Amino acid sequence: MSAVLPSRIAKLNRLRCSIFQTIYNPTGIRTGAKYLRARLRGPSMMDYYPVEMNLSKIARRYPELEVTDEDEEQRFQDIEDRKKRGKGAPKKARTKEEGRRSQRRR
């Protein structure tokens, strides 16, 4: 009984890889092929969660319905009331110099 030469085994492995469409990797280097072959998770996760529709999206998509979001209207009214009392957000600085001056005053 004769021993099979390593070169013949390597050729057989290369042929087997070409037949079964696998990667020929005689040195056994890690390639990450397992993860690259795996099915992507993103599409199935996107299908799992339903599309979230809120009132503002519906109003933007269908302006002819003239839908108003009462919570948003109330928020705008509260902001306006705070500004009248002087409790609103400060105005943004137009330049870096103005921003530095307001910080020095503190």
Image: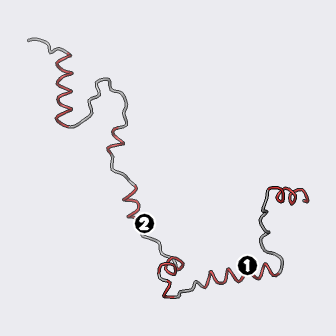
Q: Which mark is residue 79?
A: 1
Amino acid on which the number 1 mark rests in the picture: Ile
For disc 2, the marked residue is 49
Using the image, determine if residue 101 lies above or below residue 72: above
Residue 95, x across and y down, in percent: 79, 59
**Could you tell me which secondary element the residue under label 2 belongs to?**
loop
Q: Is disc 2 surrounded by few (<14), some (14 to 19) or many (20+) residues within 10 Å?
A: few
Q: Residue at x 57, y 86 (%)?
A: 68
In this view, the residue farthest toward the right is: 105
Q: Quadrant of residue 26?
A: top left
In this view, the residue farthest toward the top is: 2
Q: Depth-wise, is mark 2 or mark 1 nearer the camera? A: 1
Q: Quadrant of residue 31?
A: top left
**Could you tell me which secondary element the residue under label 1 belongs to?**
helix
Q: Residue at x 36, y 59 (%)?
A: 44
Residue 56, x across and y down, in percent: 54, 78
In this view, the residue farthest toward the left is: 1
Would residue 32 be found to the left or right of residue 63 on screen? left
Amino acid on which the number 2 mark rests in the picture: Tyr
